[in-house]
Image (cartoon, grey):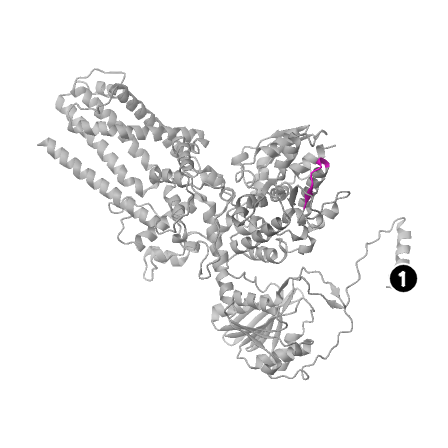
Amino acid sequence: MGYWINFIAFLVVTFYAVWIFYKVLQARISYIKMGRPANLEKNRKARMKNIWKLVFGQKKLLKDKKSGIAHVGIFYGAIIVQAGAVDLIGKGFFHGWHVPIPFYHYFTLSQEILVGIVIVAVFYMTYRRYIEKLSRLQQTFRAGLVYWFLIPLMLSVVVAEGAEMVIFNEATTVYKPLSSLFSLIIAGVSDLTATVIFYIAWWAHLLILLGYLVYLPQHKQFHEIFAIVNSYLKRLHSPGRLSSVDFEDEEQEEFGVGKIEDFTQKQLIDLYACVECGRCTDMCPASGSGKTLSPRELITKLRDHLTDKGSIVKPNTVPWAPGEIFKTPRTYAVSSSRSEASVAGGEDALPLNELNLIGDIITEEEIWACTTCRNCEDACPVSNEHVDKIVDLRRYLVLTQGEMSPEATRTFNNIERQSNPWGINRKERANWREEIEDIVVPTVKETEDFEYLFFVGSMGSFDIRSKKIAQSLVKIFNKAGIKIAILGNEEKNSGDSVRRLGNEYLFQQLAVENITNFHKYNVKKIVTIDPHAYNTFKNEYPSFGLEAEVYHHTEVLAKLIEEGRIKPEKEVNETITYHDSCYLGRYNEKYDAPRFILNAIPGVTLKEMERSRENAMCCGAGGGLMWLEEKEGTRINELRTEQALQLKPTAIATACPYCLTMITDGTKAKNVEEEVKTLDVVELLEKSLA
Amino acid sequence: MNILVLLKQTFDTEEKIVLENGKVSEEGVEFVINPYDEYAVEEAIKIKEELGGEVTTISLGPDRFESAIRTALAMGVDKAILVDDPDVFGDEYTAAKVLTEVIKDQTYDLILAGYVAVDDASGQVPQRIADMLNIPIISTAVKIEIDGSNITVHRDVEGDTEILEAPLPVIITSQQGLNDPRYPSLPGIMKAKKKPLDRLSADDIGVSPDEVKAKTEVIETFLPPKKEAGRILSGEISDQGRELVQLLRSEAKVI
């Protein structure tokens, strides 16, 4: 009789929990489907490789060694111990049964070890979150709720197993170390008591497991499913390539993302994959310098807005169950009075789904604070892609609404009219070359005989300081006998800033004009001193028809040194730290060429900053922010300069005219511009050439 | 609130002036809305957005003006009038006379214009129109507030601010600082292609070329002399002083 009651109760509870899990999961999937279909590249092999690397290899998690190792313990421990649940649950129905596998005692041993590991890992994680109070982690009760599922779940395994050992009078064994320990503790109790203890633990295990199943999709623990999905679906092309807008369709009235459904389904999956670990915000230069933007909050606000809006648009779905006990408090601060009324449910309340994505959920300050440096994406263990969301929101503001700061308007107008951000006369673009003595830099009109087209960029052409970078480079090329030509006054702005500021329309115009010129003059190889132009030529222009090899000047120079075509012989006695450009480094993984050049210069001592290579902090100029005012918080370039100054260098080297400007301004702000030089790698190299 | 905006197309402020056969060459030049007129356009649209009504631009000039007018339409202007009849092109008098005739056929509460055009920089046309229409004019506005049928204008007076009030209708000319002109949205640009642009000839507005004939004549057009490199005097201070006076008298001929 008791057996059947137990069995029926088991069926009812299990069915109920699975049903809720299904409904809640289905709700979220239907919300994701509100998004536009995503156009993903088909390449199963590459995608499976990402699963191995990111899910089973836990690659990104291990960037934070301490938390990473604890997570590996929990990840593998929990998976394998969950498999052991089959064994335990079976035992509740069939007295003395166990899963029929060979070497069962090794199975029990592995279970017990993993139980131990998970318990230790959970205690360590609790310590990290609540005692060490790691700044990137939230210290709320809810944030750590999963710990209180895992500990009793693990203990119930030990208790049930230990009780069973008493019932069957099993001797203690090394294959069940923890259970044996427990069986010793309760040794001597009657069979009935032991059976009761067994069933309490058995039910506890089952209920926690099912409770967890219900809780999972309603919480950040959902990452257990969606992080895997996301690792599989993550973009395979270069992160330096943003999506293109098709302007052919004249019926279109909206461009970019103005409401949550305008995101692609892949972008919406990102939202549910977020585990709120804060690694993104920890690395974000905007968050770090006191701006409103935090990549984690960006994602969680969008996620909660999606769930809110989805549950209203699709009233038959079940976003929370049972009742609202697992409902997460809304993460978006309701800013305007309008939205306060609606959330409070006042008389003239607007339904939640009428809140504006831009303005009520995500503020314009947040949208314009991003430097597109991709440090967040690089740190994200669940492969979320933040930057394209920001650019999509900017596209809506710029293209659909015409809403932007006066500085952005000015930048666009100037580039439209004169093809440079300052609006300097476009016919003066090639004037920089007249400042170099003895060397003739021909335009493509003046010579057909050139190996590289040198794309000077607006900075190299007009900015007084950056012109010197261009001049150093042509001097070295001249020495090495490399033939180059420039587009001269036909060169247009590369469009990188324009695209990242959301003006896709103007970007496509510029891209097409530049590409037409490249092809007209039979350009085969392009070299540039601007990592932003480099990235957009290499990764974005091909979508508009460019066929040419693209190089950053440090790549070409490193090769020239390697081949012995230039020999850095003069000593340059400097202690140098190299600041990685985001668009050269994180976007294109070019970390070694600039370092190779610096190490080839006699007398140079190269010191690495704590944040270097893929962890390097942005200078603050990316994403078109070079041209906008930085009003909120501290200045990003000063923070980065401080990091460099900690090494007490005599010079800070860069490989990007934007970075150079920002870091130079940083040394000026810190009053060290006399003691600490700021130079492009090519300028340091030039000093070393005889 | 119906607002008329006087709009001229000019060279981009960064263009270099090139003379060809004694005339300013337009070859390969980038044209823009006269920047001061752009402030007027922006202000008109802002007022319309707040108070409702219609914004119309009125221009006098060649066919190429259309691109500037379309930009204004993309920013949010509702319709435009362009007098593109070369028979009625002339000087400031001509412009004022022709524009006044166009304005007389319109209903309006407010006329906005740039205080000066960056090309010939005469800064006369709005004043002349005010006189011909016999309505008040307030120039170089940096702030405009409308309360019913009254208007309060903060105007820039060489670095100071003067606050004036006037009844509508009135002509107001804009100074830098009035606003930050918007960047047209893409749907705005699309819509602008379909917005009405009326092209009028002398006949349409009922003026004879003779009656609006220019009252001034251009005798010669020339570029300012090239700036020569400066000279630094050396030697004893007293000698330098003596040399300076001598040079000012004999070479520069200013004393």
Q: Is residue A350 above or below residue A181?
A: below
Does the magenta portion include A433? no
Amino acid on which disc 1 is placed: Arg
Count of numbered labels shown in the rendering: 1
- The residue lying toward the viewer, choosing from A518 and A301, is A518
- The residue lying toward the viewer, choosing from B178 and B195, is B195
Measured as percent of width and height from the top left, residue A126 is found at: 36, 32
Q: Residue at x 28, y 24 (%)?
A: A111
Q: Is residue A382 left or right of residue A676?
A: left
Instruction: Please identify the quarter of the rendering in which residue B132 is found.
Output: bottom right
- The residue lying toward the viewer, choosing from A550 and A589, is A550
- The residue lying toward the viewer, choosing from A311 and A50, is A50
Disc 1 marks which residue? B249
Magenta range = A479-485
Measured as percent of width and height from the top left, residue A87 is found at: 22, 27
Q: Is residue A620 visible?
A: no
Q: Is residue A250 visible?
A: yes
The C terminus of chain A, quarter of image:
top right
Q: Residue at x 55, y 43 (%)?
A: A538
Q: Chain of mark 1?
A: B
Q: Secondary structure at mark 1?
A: helix
Measured as percent of width and height from the top left, residue A615 is found at: 51, 36
